[in-house]
Image: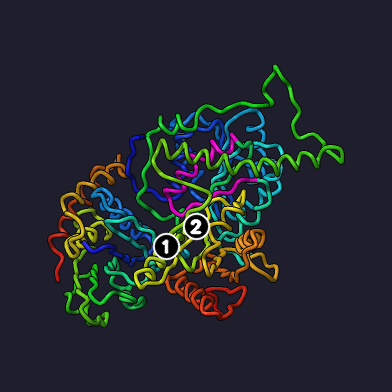
Amino acid sequence: MSKINVVARTGNEAMAEAMRQINPDVVAAYPITPATEIVQIFASYVADGLVDTEFVPVESEHSAMSACIGSSAAGGRTMTGTSSQGLALMAEILYVASGLRLPIVLAEVNRALSSPINIHCDHSDTMMVRDAGWIQIFSENAQEAYDNMVQAVKIAETAALPTMVTTDGFIISHGMERIEIFEDKDVKDFVGPKKLGQYLLNLEKPITLGALDLQDYYFEHRRQLAEAMIDSKNIILDVAKTFKDKFGRAYGLFESYKLDDADRAIVVMGSTAGTAKVVADGLRAKGIKAGVLKLRVFRPFPKAEVAEALKNIKAVAVMDRSDTISGHEGPLALEVKAALFDSNIKKEVPDYIFGLGGREVRLEDIESVYKDLGDIIDGKSKDRVTYLGVRE
Amino acid sequence: MKNLIEIRWHGRGGQGAKTAALLLGDAALAKGLYIQAFPEYGPERMGAPVASFNRISPKPILLHSGVTNPDVVVVLDPTLIESVNVTEGMNENGILIVNTERAPKEVKSDCGVKGDIKVFTVDASGISKDCIGKDIPNTPMLGALVKATGILDFKEMLEDTKHKLEKKFKSKPEVIEGNLKAIERAFNEVKS
């Protein structure tokens, strides 16, 4: 087992620390507002000679991802970081990265999208690119942000898929917490040297990347991308197992918190999961069997596993920190409901859209969701979508 | 110590409310405790009211909601009392520590303190001017907080803060010395 060092770090510092230990070949970034400190901290590591990374300061996030694609295609281990509008500006190029099957790792801090202008936490940015062909891993706290970053490189390179690791803006990114970090050499060993498959700078075996691909092969390549995403589920689990063997902490596709005997459960992602666990514990002290399903991996979506975990629970609610503005549920609820439907599980699953633009989610808010679930158990029906904590 | 202690720092932009929370978090971590330290992010302007927060616990902290019912409130600038309800949401047996020359009894009536909230005062600005040459009340208030709450061992806290300051002010040893003296004086001079 690896030696650990207990330190106080913000989520941003934790992610930058993981990047330093991974020591990628290239980091290309541009700090659009609202940027986080992740890349800034990493740039100081470059300036101080603590990493061997070629740091490419570009003029926009669109260019940052483009430079990452060039670097990754050439065979370099490549990372970047962004948030909110920056991720939105990258969106076009995110699709190029996944289409070319480039294992770029992105540290993403979940924040609201304009307008109105806002820099605080919600999941709108990450959800906006949920169909971009990137693996998406959510973190509850700074520790998970660090652990997920360390795992992401291995996941991305094994799956040949770009991977984003997210934390909640401000709540985790700017909040300092106790975390355990590993020795540099242990992270280096875990990540291993980059396995080079096909790459542009291989002069022995020249290839073309990003060529025109019309009716004849485009469809097959997209199908392969979809298959890679399906396959990545087991890769994520394998990497988690190796991580647990080496570092001791267990990760899965999601965390089942007191679900075994629960009669009511909330499905939620990110930092709110921790708060929901505290509320569930409080209810359990009063004899109410509450649980939490904290989704870690949103892409690939672990459909069958989520349905299996929820099948025996009488009442389930989803809390969505973003909205689809579709007249229906938020993105997480749509996935959960589809999962239940396909497993022939018929349940009323109310969705609670919450915390947009950093709106505080209080213990009472989460308690009210569990109370609604109690009402459902008692045979009362609830609204399909509730905007939790909004003034109206 | 009780399971979870929640602390709210009130200051004005530039007074170091965030740094105080970070330093306290670091010192508690060094003692093997679980910690959170986070500022309230609003428009950041020099002189505008700001707040920052700590959670300290012997067990892992899962809560990621805001601190609404603090056990301890520290006020870095006494003029905030006129514009901000510094005792808002405070627990009945809470501890209020104010940087002021006034006596705890006077502050108690200024703030309309109810119940069993204990009030402590210390002239952290005066101490800071003496020891550091500037009005930076955040580090001395750390000393006052440790005295008033007893949540950390003073010597250990001082030692850890010294390490942190040594990293931050490598080229200014006089700043480190001044800060440590200020923390110690505030620890000794805080009144209840």
How many other residues sit within 10 Å of disc 1, few (<14), some (14-19) or many (≥20)? many
Q: Nearer the viewer, residue A260 or A225?
A: A260
Q: Amino acid at mark 1?
A: Lys
Q: Looking at the rendered structure, which numbered label has been put on residue A98?
A: none
The stretch in magenta equals A134-158
Residue at the (30%, 65%) spot, across then down: B7
Real-space Cα separation, disc 2 to disc 1, in angstroms = 9 Å
**Quarter holding residue A116:** bottom right
| Residue position marked by numbered label 1 in the rendering | A277
What is the quadrant of residue A97 in the picture?
Answer: top right
The residue marked by circle 2 belongs to what chain?
A
Relative vertical location of residue A210 with respect to residue B81 in this rendering, above or below: above
Question: Chain under label 1?
Answer: A
Q: Quadrant of the N terminus of chain A?
A: top left
Q: Label 1: state its secondary structure.
A: helix
Farthest residue to the left: give it. B188
- Is residue B78 something that shows in the picture? yes
| Residue at 46%, 70% in the rendered image | A366
Please give left or right for residue A130 compared with residue A144 in the image: right
Q: Is B184 or A176 nearer to us in this picture?
A: A176
Answer whether residue A200 is magenta in the image: no
Mark 2 lies on residue:
A294
CB-based contact (under 8 Å), mark 2 and mark 1: yes
> Magenta region, mostly helix, strand or loop?
helix
Q: Is residue A114 something one can see in this rendering?
A: no
Q: Is residue B161 left or right of residue A109?
A: left
